[in-house]
Amino acid sequence: MALLELRGISKRFGGLQALNRVDLTLEDGMIAALIGPNGAGKTTLFHTLTGIYRPDEGEIHFIGRSLVGLKPDKITGAGISRTFQNIRLFAHMTVLENILVGMHCRISTSLWGILLQSQGAHRQERDAARRAMELIELAGLRGKENEWAHQLSYGEQRRLEIARALAANPKVLLLDEPTAGMNTTEAQSLMMLFKDLIGRYVQAVLLIEHNMRVVMGISHRVYVLDYGEKIAEGHPDEVRRDPRVIEAYLGPGTWVGDAQS
Amino acid sequence: MKVGLTHVGVVAYIIASSALVFVFPQSVLAFLCFEASLLVIYYASVDQTTKFCLGTIVLLVLLPLLGSVNGYYLEVAIQVGIFVALALGLNIVVGFVGLLNLGFVAFYAIGAYLWAIFGSPQANHFLPGNLFPLSSVWFFPFLLLSVGVGALTGALLGLPVLRLRGDYLAVVTLGFAEVVRALVNNFDKPINITNGPKGITPIEKPPLFFQPLLEFLGFSVNPSTLYPFYFYFLVLFIAMLTVVVARRLEESRIGRAWKAIREDEIAAAAMGIPVVRMKLLGLAVGASFASAVGVLFAAKQVFINPESFTFMESIGVLAMVILGGMGSIPGAILGATGVTILNLQVLKGLSLWLNSVRQSGIVLSIPLFGDFTLSQIPAQFEPAKYERMVFGLILILMMMFRPQGVLPPRQKRGH
């Protein structure tokens, strides 16, 4: 059964058709990649999916409920977490605090519980801190939990952002160009991490990627966007040979082999 | 517990500075030394329990004792306490949530007028039955009520302005404070609610509920000497309460949500934080602090008028927060204490000193310039007249050399 299903999503900004009737399905246990040239509408699709934009048309179904019109925090609460293309950490908060913010919707202490320091509030804080340390460990940031987020190196910040998204205990993880700015080896090892996440931390991953080669290795299905339209979908090998994809990426009349390298 | 040299040093400093104030009760310098003992305790490398005990002794025992020597010191301490609570409230709004509020004094005014109107004969002007002033026993229920009213007005102000950011929000909050001031200034007709610019007096003081106990114990004290001490402890209690509330909130999921909104609103929403609700909560909590101390202020002053709630007051509290270090609770406390002491004691002390120099009639012989009589120093040189200038200079220098404030938020260790 489909975990997440997008049907006919359209989004216009004035005269620009940013998304045109895009369909997308994400199933349990699946890593799907969203690729396409710059300005194809990939990030717009993420923003629409996470409630930052409201789609003009179309349906978003997530485990049997519609997400259209929900605020971003409610969508996160429902079980969809994301990272951002240009890292958006909370710079003047510690690594630990960043993760704990991600857990906001999984901690339910009330104002009175906090002010009166109730037992329940105390226990929840302790549990949250323990789980946060696990995620810090997973992101390879052990020993840096009390550093400020802006003091981390670029790669560490990327990993922290992913750990923060996982802190919300999502079913679906959306990653917006997680390997941007990394070299191929770093990118490959990060991809291996995503593979490990499935089943243990999340049920499905949808990632936007520029680097085709990185995506091909791990994704079960690839969606290709161009000018807001889905031009291809399918197994990585099929998509790679699709002439429309090659045209979109490299311009018309290019030899197939170029897209592979 | 190991008693080290530092312990001895801190205790010695406290004893020495208190002794100094006892010997020279009129000396501003001596009292400044004593006030610094709190900083010494804060910075000394001793364990938390010792710090807590020493702080308690200084605030609960020594300061009231010194206040019995020179009553003005109690007044200073009360003012400091009021501003600490205000600064902590504003620190939540500006420092944690990151909403620039230039009209914070409006909530202070709302609290003050709440008690002033009902705790004085003023309410008889628009409510029948000659029930007012309410008896002083009502002071405490009104203190609680003011927390609710403050929170409500804070949230109400928040509703229309939450879509605004940065500069726009600042302008709206500024306008809000001016609206509140204009309202209290003009609401003497057609129905006299606030008595306009004439202000309201006399306002009931808090009840002396412990007087029978003191008399039973054999003390006979007249209320006028008792009230400064009473207010001091009341202010101290409320200031401490605000510290505890601010700290607990800061370390909870609510405080983290506030800071996340300050850092990046979109990312905060994407992390599951209900941005609007959290912003409203921040505004409400901040406003409730101000409103509660407003009630206290009205009861202490006995007389209030709109002049006490000008834009400069808002700016003053904001400066305390910025100087101390935005988003830092110790910073807000230090900023409020420092600025209040600077205004009430340092600058006034300098003026007094300059006056005494002028009146001494000493003649200085300066080579090339000839004789200069010190009494020729014009009265315009009194530092108290330059209060705002000195204050402005401090702000400028701080922003140039330490923009993060004296005690910026620190990374917490240990979890």
Image: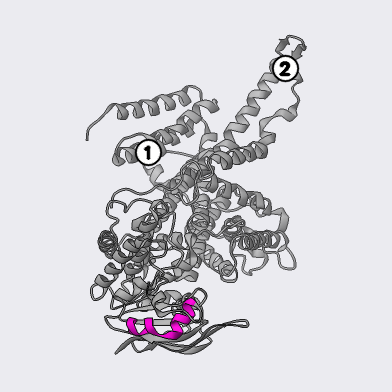
Q: Position of residue A237 (x, y in %)?
A: 33, 82
Identity, as a three-letter code, of the amino acid under mark 1? Gly
Q: Nearer the viewer, residue B409 or B342?
A: B409
Residue A64, how many percent across, how many down?
Answer: 35, 89
Instruction: Determine the CA span between mark 2 and mark 1.
Output: 43 Å
Could you say whether the residue bearing mark 2 is in a helix, strand or loop?
helix
Determine which of the numbered discs, if any, sits on residue B362 in the image.
Answer: none
Q: Is residue B239 above or below residue B163?
A: above
The residue stretch that appears in magenta: A235-250
Queried whether the magenta region covers residue B216, the answer comes back as: no
Residue B60 against residue B250 in the figure, above or below: above
Task: Please tell me which residue lies in front, A162 or A77.
Answer: A162
Observer-nearest of B125 and A156: A156
Residue positioned 44% across, 61% down in the render: B260
Q: Residues within 10 Å of mark 1 (few under 14, many from 20)?
A: some
Residue B183, percent across and down? 69, 63
Residue tagged by mark 2? B374
Question: For the stretch drawn in magenta, what is the main secondary structure?
Answer: helix
For label 1, the residue is B55
Residue, x 52% and y 58% (percent of image)?
A: B98
Residue A163 visible? The answer is: yes
Where disc 1 sits, the SS reads helix
Check residue A248 for magenta coloring.
yes
Q: How many marks?
A: 2
Residue A66 lies, with reference to residue B109, above or below; the image says below
Chain bearing tag 2 is B
Q: Say which residue appears at 53% left-offset and 54% top-offset.
A: B90
User: Nearest the camera: B289 or A186?
Assistant: A186
Compare marks 2 and 1 and give the one earlier in the sequence: 1
Quadrant where the image shows the N terminus of chain B: top left
